Amino acid sequence: MELKTTGFLLDKTLLAGQTFGWSKVNGSWCSFFKKPILLKQKPSGEIEFSGASEMEVKQMLGLDDDIEGIKAEIDKDDFIDRAISYSYGLRVVKDGLWPSTLSFILSIQSNIPLITKRIKTLSKLYGSGSSVSGIELNSFPSYQSVHDGGKDKLERVKLGFRSRFVLSAADYFYSHEISEDMSVDELRESLSNILGVGDKVLDCTMLYGLHDLSAFPMDVWILRALSNNYPHLLKGLKSYKSKRKAMSDYFGRYAGYAQLFIYDYVRHL
């Protein structure tokens, strides 16, 4: 099946450091979060897809977002204007609650290649095998499989201090009622009980897991860019929360898109 798109780049979106459960094989992007999915963008811009409905593809890739309206609303200064122009074709994804929580726990003091490698290793250890269009895939590690495997099995993967965070997350999801139907405030409060889940991981999970476009995660790249380009907004602010609030107030309800565009832009300067 095919899906028409305008102003969207699949490679750029899946390589932007917001999702880590995808692999590119023979020119196609494959994932196995809940089921095997295959995506490929044609030179004309259409997305060929299998394993998912059109609605699911649109949701996971942010294709229903009013991207031109969003850009117009956040385009408030010369710096973000340059970031918006550079990040043409980029969309905020929606990975789901558990995949995003696990991914960004693994992102602590790490980088994109290492996060991706860890997800693939965990998928081989815990996931089930399947195929789509002849491509063999391992499913994204479920919280139940990690919980059931316990500490001994997880220690086969070299996660360092992150191991106890991963196990804490799996145990928490297994033993608590937690779903995407909960309010953002309820989810933030609940996820905060997991070891290793601080403000940054929470913001990443809200933005990239649940598509809460008001979230504004900040890592070292973002904080450096903010310090260089928005010192007037951050003057006197010390805490993560106070800086995040200042930037969320400035960019408004689509602050998450501003964050993604800034992140994409400054990483490639």
Image (cartoon, grey):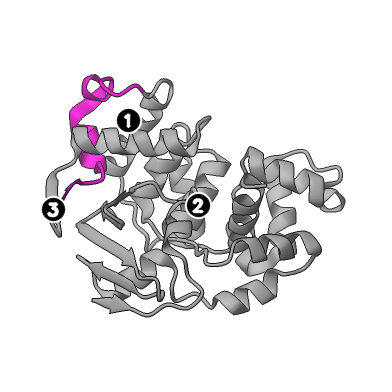
Label annotation for residue 16:
2
Is residue 109 visible in the rendered structure shown here?
yes
Residue at 26% x, 45% y: name it.
Answer: 140
The residue type indicated by label 2 comes to: Ala
The residue type indicated by label 3 comes to: Ser
User: Which residue is denoted by mark 3 in the rendering?
Assistant: 131
Placement of 133 over or under 148, stated as above or below: below
> Residue 61: horizontal and vertical position, in percent?
41, 65
Q: Secondary structure at mark 3?
A: strand
- Of pointers 2 and 3, the one earlier in the residue sequence: 2
> Residue 114: horizontal and vertical position, in percent?
42, 33
Question: Where does the magenta region start and end?
Answer: 135-158
Q: Answer whether residue 140 is magenta in the image.
A: yes
Q: What whole-number distance in Å separates the C-alpha atoms at marks 3 and 1?
A: 28 Å
> Residue 77: horizontal and vertical position, in percent?
80, 65
Q: Residue most toward the front?
A: 43
Mark toward the viewer: 2 or 1 = 2
Label annotation for residue 167:
1
The residue type indicated by label 1 comes to: Leu
